[in-house]
Image (cartoon, coloured by chain):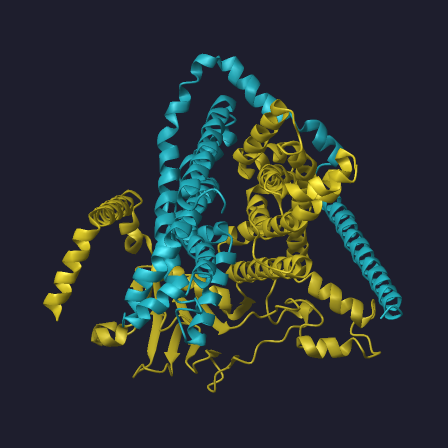
Chain colours: A yellow, B cyan
Amino acid sequence: MSSSLAIQRENIRKLFPDTFKQARKSRLRGQIIFFLVLVYLIVGFFTLDVVDIPKKWKPQNAAMFVLDTYAHKDHVTMKWENHEDIKIAFEGNYRSIYGRDNLDKSIPDWFYKNSDNVGNVVEFNNKGKAILYKDKVEIVNFPKYERDFTIKLNSNGKPYLVGSEDLVIEDLKGFRITENRVEFRPTLYERIQVYPKKVEIHRYSIGWKYFWFDFSSPLEPYSFFEALGLTFSKERVVPEMSNLKLFLTEIKDNEAFMHGRVWWAMLETIVMAVLGTMFATVMALPLSFLAAYNVTPIKALRFTLRRLFDTLRGIDFLIWSLIFLRAFGPGPFTGIFAIGFTDTGTLGKLYSEAIENTEKKQQEGVQSTGASKFLQHRFGIIPQILPIFVSQSLYYLESNTRGAVIIGAMGAGGIGLQFLGALGTGNDFENVAYMAILVLAVVIFMDRLSAWLRRILIGSDQLIVR
Amino acid sequence: MAKALPANLEQIEVNLKKLTNQRTRSSLLGIAILILIFFGGTLVSLEANAGSFGRGIANFFNYPRDLFVDTFEMGWKYWPRVIKYIPELIITLNIALFSTSIGFILAIIFAIFSSRNLIRNKRVIQFTKFLMDVTRSFPTLIIAMVFLYLMGKSSLPAVIAITIHTAGALGKLFTEAIENCDGKPIEGLSSVGATWTQKIRFSVLPQVLPLFLSYGILRLEINVRESTILGFVGAGGIGEMLAALIQWNYGADVLACMFLLVGTIIALDYLSAYWRHKLIGANQ
């Protein structure tokens, strides 16, 4: 069977030698291209230091970053010289301290006096406890640890782990001991650090605390829905303003998540994208007619416009935004014009190609009725290209939203700059995550909106190219 | 018969009028919405902008003029400095080319697992589509910034960011290409008992590869722009150099870098148009 197949194949090969030769040639070409790409990838691998990823990737940093995006922490600080003055601060912020009289903010229930009535207990979410005394810190009840630990200061005022000589390595897991610090971090969520001057405890909990109302807000004791319910009640939470107004301003002026500023920045970014696209469409529409050979007979004009489109597009929006940033200063105008100028080039080119590809017959039909040139274009060309125009412009709206975020980050303001700022502080990663999610949601929304508009306006959400 | 016709015509007339009215109404509504957006947006911009609009317009030519004046003062014989920045440009191009290649390969994998005519399992398709949506929607800048923060200054964050974005963006286009391809070659191969991989290799891939390459070249062009921008925030290459030069106010050098960039982008633009023309013919 197989031998007869082989014979048949041989016969076919003899019958059409040219075809087979060509096939082999093109296959060889494919293999050579494949080989070259492979070589390039290997070269790129080394020239771009991709091999260094494991070296540069610091899992500790990444873990802290990720942890901070979904969790919050409370700092408990005790100075050795005055062990009764213990500060509990949200995220270590000096403005968010529990138990201060002026804030009427009670001490959280995970901080209490020990049963011996001497030590103060910080209880973690995993039931482990750190007990703070005048001269020592006791670490008790941690799951997966057989025994309790005590950290004291020696005669030189340096912290040390009591009895650490007797402990096996297994027990010391989670400890990091240096000359001036003893740190105990069994998991990411608990961290106890003892220094010669003070003890600092970080207690992590999952979630974005104070997302709706910030630390010092009068509405903070209530949950979002409780507060929403309060807006319908007559009794005022604060005497100065109505509950509804309080509700809205407290959310807007949230100090931790800065909803007001973030949403305003988001609006700026959206405005940049939408008005930029509008500007480009309005500019490109007449220019594209002048650049199409079936509308404009003057070759020099067409050539000039074509090169103008190329230049506008070639000067990338990066450079445009640099120029406009100098002129307008930070703000949406920079973004609008940078996007507008770049896309005038892009859309102008696409539109004029679309006009050149229209059917001639419809225009001739209008011409046969004795219509003027203007009317020929109005009724012969525009109905043919309108769906293409709309589809192209809407398609660019979505990518311009992303572009507007980038222009913003380069100095034009908007959500891009806010994002950069939050990342730059190095510890507001929950804001970074919040803004990233917001950007993601808005970009996906714009994508869907543009697809939906294309569908209802022209009956298909696929991009029509020419 | 003769009596029925006028009634019909009347009906047609009425319908036509109704349709025309409806059309006019929706057009007017659309225009009204656009005008509203325009004015709303302008108000927001005026409120948020640091400088005024009029002064901005007046200042528009200042910076370009400064750059040219600076260059002129330096004397045009300093123009060879353009050559000095070519190595930086090559870094930028390298980032773009490498991440486009890797992204291209990832996109093919994505596309295969999200095409309805290749995969039967709906869950897999939904998951892959979701993955592509997410990777595509994040601006590269945001991914790059996060990785820059985590890994320190190097070109790697740019490579990672562009690769992720490219995989999602190309994946979507590739999926459409695969779903729109002719089903008959697949059936033909099924009839001779080809396996799933063989079907993809010999019936789907030959149909879609030219289109894939054409999209890939277009993406390469976009990615060169992207990698320049990422250079601006610290990913190396000509973008970073340009950012530094602007900060130092070296007008002539800024202009040299800009010319280099614009020249590259325009050259790539023509090159990509030429390649794509060759790949998929004039009418696509």
Q: Is residue B155 above or below residue B192?
A: above
Residue A98 position by quadrant:
bottom right
- Residue B91 locus on image (x, y percent): 36, 37
- Residue A437 locus on image (x, y percent): 55, 62
From this viewpoint, which residue is outermost toward the front?
A: B2
Q: Is residue A329 above or below residue A175?
A: above
Q: Quadrant of the N terminus of chain A?
A: bottom left
State the residue at coordinates (56%, 28%). A307
- A442 or A398: nearer the viewer: A398
- A360 or A379: nearer the viewer: A360
Does residue A319 appear left or right of residue B112 in this picture? right
State the residue at coordinates (52%, 13%). B73
Q: Is residue A387 above or below residue B117?
A: above
Does residue B175 appear left or right of residue A157 in this picture? right
- A165 or B244: nearer the viewer: B244
Q: How many numbered tags mark residues here? A: 0
- Residue B248 locus on image (x, y percent): 50, 28
- Residue A349 locus on image (x, y percent): 58, 38
State the residue at coordinates (79%, 70%). A244
Q: Is residue A332 visible?
A: no
Residue A228 position by quadrant:
bottom right
Does residue A437 appear left or right of residue B12 in this picture? left
